[in-house]
Amino acid sequence: MLRGLDAPAETFLWDRLTVSLEFVQLRSRTTTYQKGGSVARCFHGRRLTCEAMRHYWLLIGACGWVLLILMFLSKFISFRAVDDYGERAGSQSGTVPGTKVVVKPIVMSSPEKQSPKSSDQPTAVPAVADWQSVAQKRIELLSTVCKNSSLRNLTHVSISKFVLDRIFVCDKHKILFCQTPKVGNTQWKKVLIVLNGAFQTVEEIPENLVHDHEKNGLPRLSSLTQQEINHRLDTYFKFFIVRDPFERLISAFKDKFVKNPRFEPWYKHDIAPAIIWKYRKIHRNNDLVASGLHFEDFVRYLGDVEGHRRMDRQFGEHIIHWVTYAELCAPCKINYSVVGHHETLEQDAPYILKAAGIDTLVTYPAIPPGITRYNRTKVEHYFSGISKRDVRRLYARYQGDFRLFGYPSPDFLLN
């Protein structure tokens, strides 16, 4: 069977080939005539042979065109199938692909049969039936690393207003969700909006409403009194989602400084020039905005211990897209119920809904196959032009996140 062709197309092709064989047999019969025949019979036989040959080559040409068309269709179908996977199709480009995610209810099922290579995935994916033990081991690891005094300055932050601003509240079902950008937060906000009763399903919620924190009906923990805050931190179901720290930084860079799909001009017009002025080795005044922020500039800024703190105060709330998980959610101060991983969201999403007791009330939007998978090739591509010194400085800042959530050290970049 020809790869990529459906059954009708294959049948059509075999019929054409059968006809061509019949013409070959006709040609053989036509060109066989008795020796010594009349000139008229010889001429007539040659004319039949020429006619047969002409039809034969016309048919061969037609079959060739049919084959070319079917091969083109096969390649086109295969290309579209790969492109529908979203970010993986453009993992090495400098922009975020424009694939639109269709929001549909997720069906509880086992993980994909074809799992990625170990080199492309930081953690193994156990069966769904074992997910409770996976979630428990993550919490135990988090607790253990929090007790490591040598990492204390990277893992411990106070429960400040900055942290409380990240935590959304669903009082109706006693849930707290800490927002960690670049891990699918929009979908979790949709889940909470449905739970609060504003909409019946996640499909009905307009995208612009989700990000309008004045109108989406999701209160932040910081809006409550200290007594109300303490009560909810002690009694509510609490969760957040993490992702490989370096891949998350790549996603933040692409989203805010390359494509900027929500039209947030301050990233390109205010933050990017400030970083370029301080961290780009060679620049000219008229090239600052025109050339745009390079990933190398971004890495130098993030890895500068004292420098980034001064600039972060200038950038304000916009830094939430690249500060550490410890700074966002204070996981060593708040006892979270579940820590989900972006790489295993297909298993984590239904588990979190069930653990929170809301799995019969709402469904998590559909996850495009493979879109959450760790992509080592993409990480290597973005870091290929970064010096070892800058990579090590960056890792020194995000080492706490790697250790707290069980992500392996990126030795392929460090050594």
Image (tube, grey):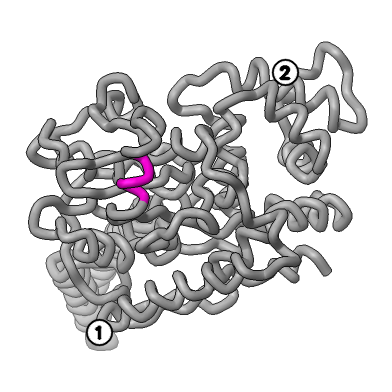
- Structural crowding at the residue carrying mark 1, measured as other residues with C-alpha within 10 Å and reported as few (<14), some (14–19) or many (≥20): few
Using the image, tell me which numbered label, if any, was put on residue 32: 1
Q: Residue at x 39, y 66 (%)?
A: 344
Under circle 2, the secondary element is helix
Tell me which amino acid carries mark 1: Thr
Hey, which residue is sitting farthest right in the picture? 282
Q: Residue at x 73, y 38 (%)?
A: 298
Question: Which region is colored magenta?
Answer: 229-233
Classify 281 as above or below 37: above
Using the image, tell me which numbered label, if any, was put on residue 290: 2
| Quarter of the N terminus within the rendering | bottom left
Horizontal side, residue 133 vs residue 14: left or right: right
Q: Position of residue 53 (x, y in %)?
A: 30, 66
Where on the picture, by quarter, is residue 224? top left
| Quarter of the C terminus within the rendering | bottom right
Horizontal side, residue 165 vs residue 309: left or right: left
Q: Residue at x 47, y 78 (%)?
A: 124
Q: Position of residue 183 (x, y in %)?
A: 44, 49
